[in-house]
Image (cartoon, grey):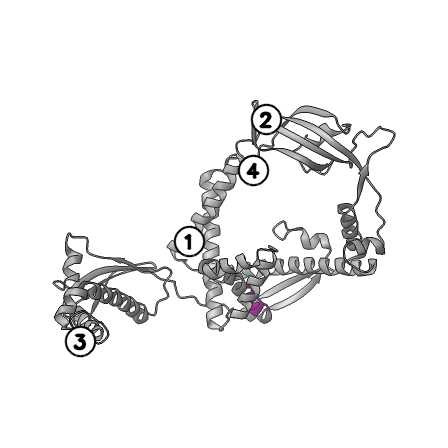
Amino acid sequence: MQVTETAAAGLKREYRVVVPATDLEAKVNERLDDLKGRVQLKGFRPGKVPVAHLKRLYGKSAMAEVIEAAVREANTKIVNDGGFKLATEPKVVLPTEEGAVEEVITGKSDLAYTVEMEIVPPITLADFKSLKLERQVAPVEDSEVDQALQTLADQNRPFGAKTDANAGAAEKGDRVIISFQGSLAGQPFEGGSGEDVPVVLGSGQFIPGFEDHLIGIKAGESRTFDVEFPDNYQSPALAGKEVTFAVTAKAVEAPSPVSVDDEFAKTLGLESLTKLREALTERTEREHAAASRQKIKRALLDQLDERHKFEPPPSLVDEEFNNVWSSIENDLKQQGRTFTDEGTTEEKARAEYRGIAERRVRLGLVIAEIGEKNNIKVTDEQLSQAVVSQARMVPGQEQRVWEYYRNNPGALAGLRAPLFEDKVVDFLLELADVTEKQVSREELFKDEDVGN
């Protein structure tokens, strides 16, 4: 086997590989000789089939297997000899001349091909003990628990038939049970109708203006009115369009007061109000911890990005950018918006998201390098636990979730990646100089990327 480097530019490499026909023929004969002792053909005793006869029957398929193995062997040799890490799978370019491949398969010509590779650049890792990070923490205040408790009470507030001095006319805060039919330019549209739909007036459940038209409506009353869908509505066919709704109120119900006490807690499956407050406190603590974690992780990734500047493999950047850009275009299309509406141009947006793609690829390679150098792995048990968590999110469909991940290696890899990243983050936080800073809930959640 002869390997010659023919091109090297940046992270791209190209090699010319030649495997003599005599080497291929020898490998084919070895395979056929091995096959001779196992194959059973009519008219021949086991182990007595002539190799020449086997070659007539299986020669081409054996040669194809030998060629495939030779290509793998050559590619492995190139990578090992060069000490490379590949960014993508090697691209093998076979001869394009008419009959060239057939000449190789029939043993009349050497196997000569070109292989193109893109490699990962060497990454020099920073001194992680020099990282300085701040972990924001916010204690859970009683007022937060009170607010969460009140929200829970409002969500579980009972409604009853309205029989007040307004003769049952709907007011803000009342619940109206409606049937409705929407039409655009006189024609019904998909998703524009419903039967026995409960609407709490003022909740913003429907598009702006819809609930306002139901103020004062009574049970049995019908109304027809026009409203306009928002410009950024998810369906482009309806975004910014004026439609007509014909609505009939089946019932008008007023909210009843809720006593937040032990009995209320029992309706939620807890034995007392004290236990309910404890559960809400624990939930809020988890929310705080998640927000704190997200903030320090982002700060850590920012420092990793600052300390590891290198050219990421272009093909990986292209792939990441294409995925991001496709999502951006789909979002704009669904909202019926343009880059001008977003206060930018397509050219500027492309440059911005190209930079984001480069950062993601670079950080991904750095995290992978840290994991490899420090033997950080996701265990099978941890991966199974992650699948269990996914299955629990869809009660009644657990078996389908298990089968989905079992039959989709790509999906399983997608589940493994964030687990691996979090393990690397934990490893780095143990090494870094981390100080805690107590902040308010508002300060902890003010960054919109963290959530609220």
Q: Which residue is mark 2?
A: 183
**C-alpha gap between disc 1 and disc 4:** 29 Å
| Front of the two marks 2 and 1 | 2
Q: Secondary structure at mark 3?
A: loop
Locate residue 47 relative to residue 169 in the image: left or right. Answer: left
Q: Are marks 3 and 1 in contact (CB under 8 Å)?
A: no
Q: CA distance from mark 3 to mark 1?
A: 59 Å
| 137 lies above or below 251 | below
**Pointer 1 residue:** 317
**Type of the residue with mark 4:** Gln
State left or right for residue 76 relative to residue 279: left
Is residue 161 at all visible to an observer of this figure?
yes
Task: Write down the region rendered in magenta.
Answer: 422-429
| Disc on the earlier residue, 3 or 1 | 3
Dot 2 or dot 3: first in sequence order is 3
- Depth check: 116 or 420 in front? 420
Dot 2 crowding, Cα within 10 Å, few <14, some 14–19, many 20+: some
Q: Residue 443: within the magenta?
A: no
- The answer to which of marks 4 and 3 sits earlier in the sequence is 3
- Crowd class of label 3 (few under 14; some 14 to 19; many from 20; radius 10 Å): few
Identify the secondary structure beneath mark 4: loop
427 in the magenta segment: yes
What is the number of the mark on residue 45?
Answer: 3
- The mark closer to the camera, 1 or 4, is 4
Identify the residue position indicated by label 4 in the image.
Answer: 234
